[in-house]
Image (tube, grey):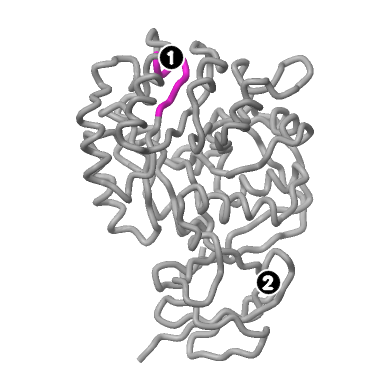
Amino acid sequence: MKKRLVLQNVKTVDEQLNDIVIEDGIIVEIAQAGAAEGEHSYNCSDLYVSSGWIDLHVHAFPAFDPYGDEIDEIGVKQGVTTIVDAGSCGADQIADLRTSAEQARTNVFAFLNISRIGLKRVDELSNLDWIDMEQAVQAAHDHKGFVVGLKARISQSVVKDNGIQPLRLARILSYKTLLPLMVHIGSAPPDIEEVLALLEKNDIVTHYLNGKSNNLFDSEEGNPLQVLLDALDRGVHLDVGHGTASFSFKVAEMAKRHGIQLNTISTDIYRRNRLDGPVYSMASVMSKFLYLGYSLEEVVTAVTRNAAAWLNKPELGRIQVGDFANLTLFAVKQGHVTLTDSEDEQRVADRYIEAKGVVVNGSFITC
């Protein structure tokens, strides 16, 4: 007998009310609000529904400290149905991450760290011998479908004296594996202009709103650097990657003022910044963009359709009859809330997003 689940009176971000009917994990009907019935019905009045939130930058390998956490703690329990681990593991341990992912309720993909040791150390690109090209190519082949790109953390604390060379090697690996790059930007050297010059269409710049001196905006006028505009013309993708040290309200305001597109909102979440902040949750990070003046539709699109499009999995970014149900339920609450960035700057918002539940892999899970 088919299991029938009905989400009654749910509201999409364009304020349309519907009932969504799910049987054996498949969306079988999108009905007029209040019209559908089933043995498992939930009254979702006052809740929004979207396709399942996707977090394109997390750290979900708990063995690595400080950069690790349990998959479902940063996935379904946050209202996030799909996470992408952003290079926690290199070739040495990517198989272990995949095994862990297969036991989780959250959908998981991964970027392969170009250093075979991954985040076992936080200076994983300080020794070029750890960039084993043959091993990386084999790992990408062995985990095709799970590995969606390559991760290179290109900031001074990671590369040490190697400068831009790890990114040059990452570019070669990208050609060999036909996988795009996700590049972490931070403190110089190498200079941000050197970094962006090596990026191509579909590559990702993560931490693009960081407040470090080596960022993407002119420190005097707040104008976007020409190298950023050139990269956007080439089709380079911008990802927030909030994290402990990589999101600045001031820089985010510069980006919005100059019309820099909002591609994907991601958290760079792991145990410490989930529990102690300033990240806390995907909903908290999304609330910061509501505060910045983006519409609810723009914010939700950044964690659904845009992320799904980058993954080349458009079905993850839509609600459509015949698709597997991949949904997030959330509320937009009115009330003052203090939001803190990575520079310890605080802003007070008058509304915020709160995750309430997900439907994923045939299950309805409350947050």
Point out residue 11 in the picture as x, y percentages from the top left corner. 68, 71
- Residue 261, image quadrant: top right
As shown in the figure, which amino acid type bears the numbered disc 1?
Ile
Task: Tell me the residue that label 1 is attached to.
Answer: 164
Q: Nearer the viewer, mark 1 or mark 2?
A: 1
Q: Residue at x 34, y 25 (%)?
A: 172
- Nearer to me, 74 or 166: 166
- Asked if the residue at tag 2 contacts the one at tag 1, i.e. Cβ–Cβ closer than 8 Å, the answer is no
Q: Is residue 359 left or right of residue 350?
A: left
As shown in the figure, which amino acid type bears the numbered disc 2?
Lys
Query: Is 264 rendered above or below residue 181?
Result: below
Whether residue 68 appears in magenta in the rendering, the answer is: no
Task: Tell me the residue that label 2 is attached to.
Answer: 11
Point out residue 238 in the picture as x, y percentages from the top left corner. 58, 36
Q: Secondary structure at mark 1?
A: loop
Q: Is residue 68 visible?
A: no
Query: Is 52 rendered above or below residue 187?
Result: below
Q: Residue at x 55, y 48 (%)?
A: 281
Q: Check the picture and name the quadrant holding the N terminus.
A: bottom left
Q: Is residue 357 left or right of residue 124?
A: right
Q: Residue at x 27, y 40 (%)?
A: 140
Point out residue 111 in the picture as x, y percentages from the top left corner. 37, 39
Which disc number belongs to residue 277? none
What is the span of residues highlighted in magenta in the rendered image? 152-159
**Label 1 to label 2, Cα distance in Å?**
48 Å
Q: Is residue 124 visible?
A: yes
Q: From this viewpoint, which residue is outermost toward the top?
A: 161
Crowding at dot 2, Cα within 10 Å, few <14 / some 14-19 / many 20+, comes out as many
Q: Is residue 262 left or right of residue 291?
A: left
Label whose residue precedes the other's in the sequence (1 or 2): 2
Whether residue 157 appears in magenta in the rendering, the answer is: yes
